[in-house]
Each structure stands twice: as C-alpha cells, then as structure tokens.
Image: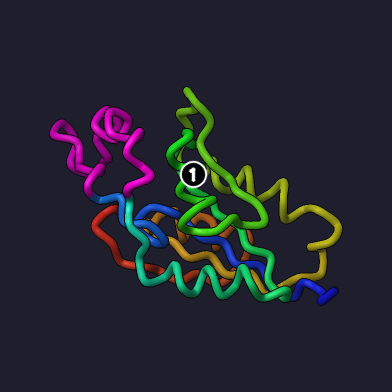
Amino acid sequence: MAKIKKIAIFDMDGVLVDSSWRYRVSKEDNTKIDLQFWRDNERGAYFDELLPMAKEYQAMLNNPEYFVIIATARTMNTASWAFIDNKLGKPDAIIYRKDKENRGGADMKIAGLKKILSLKQFKNIKDITMFEDNAKYLKAICDYFKCKGVYIPSNQGH
C-alpha cells in the first residue's frame, strides 16, 4: 500500500460540478446566492454536469499518494449522493453543510478540515492544495492551514 503524500481538497459546485442551472444570485443582495431557489431545485442535483477539473479530481482519486477531500457548502441529499456515487466518484472524505446549518462556508469548511487534518496520519503531510471558486473562502482556508490554493473561476463563486 502506497503512503499518502499529498492532500487535495476540492470545492464541489463551480469547481468539479456545473450546477449553474440551479444557481442564481439573490435579488435582495447580489453578493449572495439565492438559497431558496437553490433548495427548491436541489432534487435535480443528479442532473448537474461535470466540469473539466473533475478529470483531475478523478485522477487523484486513483492515485494512492493522494488523500482526496470534497469540502462543499451544499447540503447533501439523495440526488447529490447519487451524483457522487455514479458520476463524480467518492472522495476519501467529504465535508458538507448539515441541514439548518447557517455559518459561513469558509468557517464550515475550516471546521470540517480541522477535524480531518488533525488526524495523526496527516501530521507530517505538508503538500496540501485547495481548489475553490470563491476567492474569500480560498484565502481564509489557505491562510488557516498554510496550504496552496488554486482559484477556479466560475459563475458560482459567490
């Protein structure tokens, strides 16, 4: 069994998955997602499409030197789990928003990552990369963990 040498952390929407058909900006505050519209359409998550970065993600899943994490601000439902199982590929770990959780996406991701990255098997791994389409989340996560960040421009990065 190969030793894990690298950790790759991927946001899901806008990085691995094109869910833009279910995404729109709030009419009241154009810096935020319209969560009600998103939630009204989340049953259709199985019909989201893979983005080009999904190929890199899938290659890392098949590389035993990588531990691959999805850190998403979406709540997971049956359609989202089926999409991961049947189209995207299961990560080694997943961090996601619990129902009724309302803290910010960066804080939620940092809290989940802290639990995983503090495990003793990851103590000496310094090669950690975060792939994210929200520049504020990316900066907060990379500053906190002192890791590399890759900004993926998307129309969903609010």
* Left or right of residue 140, residue 133 in this image: left
Residue 3 forms part of the magenta stretch: no
- List the residue tagged with mark 1: 82
Circle 1 crowding by C-alpha within 10 Å: few under 14, some 14–19, many from 20: some
Q: Is residue 157 visible?
A: no
Q: Which residues are magenta?
A: 21-47
86 or 88, nearer to the observer: 86
Disc 1 secondary structure class: helix
52, above or below 82, in the image = below
Residue at position x 22%, y 47% in the image: 21
Kind of residue sitting beneath label 1 = Ala
**Can you give x and y, in whole percent of width and height, for residue 138 in the image?**
46, 60
| Residue toward you, 30 or 63 | 63
- Is 36 a magenta residue? yes
Residue reaching furthest to the left: 27
Q: Residue at x 28, y 62 (%)?
A: 154
Residue at screen point 30% across, 50% down? 19
Q: Residue at x 81, y 53 (%)?
A: 119
> Can you name the residue that lies furthest to the front here?
86
